[in-house]
Image (cartoon, rainbow, N blue to C red):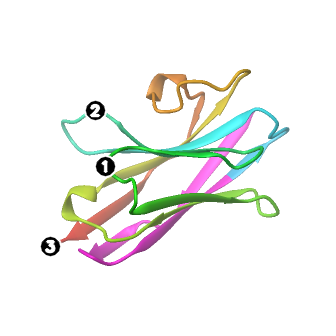
């Protein structure tokens, strides 16, 4: 139903910026939210940000509010996560996920997402 392809991860120094991308394939975007989650070894997957495709309303996890920005490009069917002022604790595998249901709900919870990308590694050096 929905396919997600991530790109853009890499190594960056603390204080710098990085943008990761999620290419989304779907038949309809009318009831789709796309979210970013991250995970480090030994920790639960953490909500980072989400965007509702129609209208573009955004939501952020407390740990990234004010530093990260999620956006979408309708023409390219791509969601971006712009990460500024990166900290070593931002190091994680970042996953793109999609929720396709009506109504969209609980966007900060891993279990509410139907589809997942492969993940992309983001490493922030001190």
Answer with mark 1 or mark 2, whichever residue precedes in sequence.
2
Q: Are marks 3 and 2 in contact (CB under 8 Å)?
A: no
Residue 120 at x, y = what percent? 43, 56
| Element class at badge 2 | loop
Residue at x 74%, y 21% (from the top left corner): 102
Q: Report the quarter where the N terminus lies.
A: top right
- Outermost residue, left side: 126
The image shows residue 2, relative to residue 9, as above or below, that is: above
Would you name the residue on which mark 3 appears? 126
Instruction: Indicate whether residue 30 is drawn in magenta.
Output: no
Magenta-tinted stretch: 1-23
Tell me where residue 34 sits by quadrant.
top right
Closer to viewer: mark 1 or mark 2 = 1
Residue sitting at 54 percent across and 23 percent down?
Answer: 112
Which residue in the protein does label 2 denote? 44
Q: Disc 1 to disc 2, how far (Cα)?
A: 14 Å
Return the disc, 3 or 2, that comes first in the chain's sequence.
2
Residue under label 1, please give it.
Answer: 63
Q: Quadrant of the C terminus?
A: bottom left
């Amino acid at each position: 139903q929905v396919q997600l392809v991530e790109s853009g991860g890499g190594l960056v120094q603390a204080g710098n910026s990085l943008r990761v991308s999620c290419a989304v394939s779907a038949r309809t975007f009318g009831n789709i939210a796309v979210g970013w989650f991250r995970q480090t070894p030994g920790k639960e997957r953490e909500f980072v940000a989400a965007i509702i495709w129609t209208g573009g309303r955004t939501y952020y996890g407390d740990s990234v509010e004010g530093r990260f920005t999620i956006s979408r490009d309708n023409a390219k069917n791509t969601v971006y996560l712009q990460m500024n002022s990166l900290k070593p604790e931002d190091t994680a595998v970042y996953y793109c996920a999609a929720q396709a249901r009506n109504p969209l709900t609980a966007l900060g919870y891993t279990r509410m997402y139907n589809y997942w990308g492969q993940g992309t590694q983001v490493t922030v050096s001190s």
